[in-house]
Image (cartoon, grey):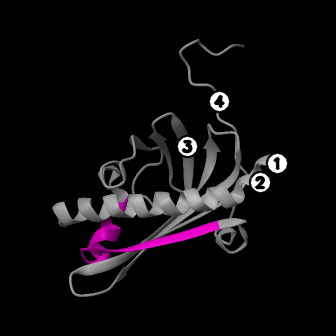
């Protein structure tokens, strides 16, 4: 049976990875930034699609699991032409980690993100974003380039998030 012509094509499945993937991934990049706000207040926003859409300039976030959200929660995220299905591996008051289960970019074999917020100076916190990935087959030769691209992406994303948090205190 064929899909209707306007239906989204099926997305390739990625290799499911556990939290320990951050310790073994061939590419693992951590970015951090001092931001305005208490860690608990920022962590409470993990559940809000606006945090992800406006704070990080994602195109859309659709929660595909009912509330309350926590470990094993799923969502679909779109950023331009990129579409992913995610599953949360950890959900704590100041930390979320998730893996990508499906992605419409065929070069990626496994991908996960870990977001942590820790109180720092009064009224401020440090947001730490770690991204781990493994590319497929011959694309693995691009791991050094992926590492550099993720460093730039981390700097840009956390800068955007910092400005958003500054302008929208909890």
Of the residues under marks 3 and 4, which one precedes in the sequence?
4
Instruction: Compute the Cα span from label 1 to label 3.
Output: 20 Å
* Circle 2 residue: 140
Of the residues under marks 2 and 3, which one precedes in the sequence?
3
Q: Could you tell me which secondary element the residue under label 3 belongs to?
A: strand
Tell me if residue 98 can be seen: no
Point out which mark residue 137 bears: 1
Task: State which quadrant residue 79 falls in.
Answer: top left
Residue at the (72%, 13%) spot, across then down: 1
* Circle 4 residue: 10
Instruction: Compute the Cα span from label 2 to label 1.
Output: 6 Å
Q: Of all residues shown, which one is farthest toward the bottom?
A: 121
> Which circle, 1 or 4, is nearer the viewer?
1
Task: State which quadrant residue 80 falls in.
Answer: top left
Instruction: Compute the Cα span from label 1 to label 4.
Output: 21 Å
Q: Is residue 43 magenta?
A: yes
Of the residues under marks 4 and 2, which one precedes in the sequence?
4
Q: Which residues are magenta?
A: 28-46
Q: Is residue 170 left or right of residue 98?
A: left
> Which circle, 4 or 2, is nearer the viewer?
2
Residue at the (43%, 58%) spot, across then down: 69
Local packing at callout 2 (Cα closer than 10 Å; few below 14, some 14-19, many 20+) is some
Does the CB distance between marks 2 and 1 fall below 8 Å?
A: yes
């Amino acid at each position: 049976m064929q899909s209707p012509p306007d239906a989204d094509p099926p997305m390739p499945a990625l290799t499911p990875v556990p939290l320990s993937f951050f310790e073994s991934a061939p590419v693992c990049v951590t970015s951090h930034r001092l931001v305005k706000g208490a860690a608990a207040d920022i962590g409470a926003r993990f559940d809000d699609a606006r945090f992800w859409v406006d704070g990080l300039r994602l195109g859309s976030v659709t929660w595909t699991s009912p509330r309350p959200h926590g470990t094993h929660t799923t969502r679909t995220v779109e950023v331009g032409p990129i579409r992913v299905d995610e599953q949360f591996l950890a959900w704590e008051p100041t930390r979320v980690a998730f893996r990508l289960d499906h992605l419409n970019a065929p070069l990626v074999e496994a991908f996960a993100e870990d977001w942590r917020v820790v109180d720092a100076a009064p009224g401020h916190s440090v947001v730490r974003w770690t991204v781990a990935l493994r590319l497929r087959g011959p694309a693995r030769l691009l791991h050094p380039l992926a590492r550099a691209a993720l460093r730039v992406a981390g700097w840009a994303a956390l800068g955007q998030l910092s400005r958003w948090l500054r302008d929208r205190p909890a």
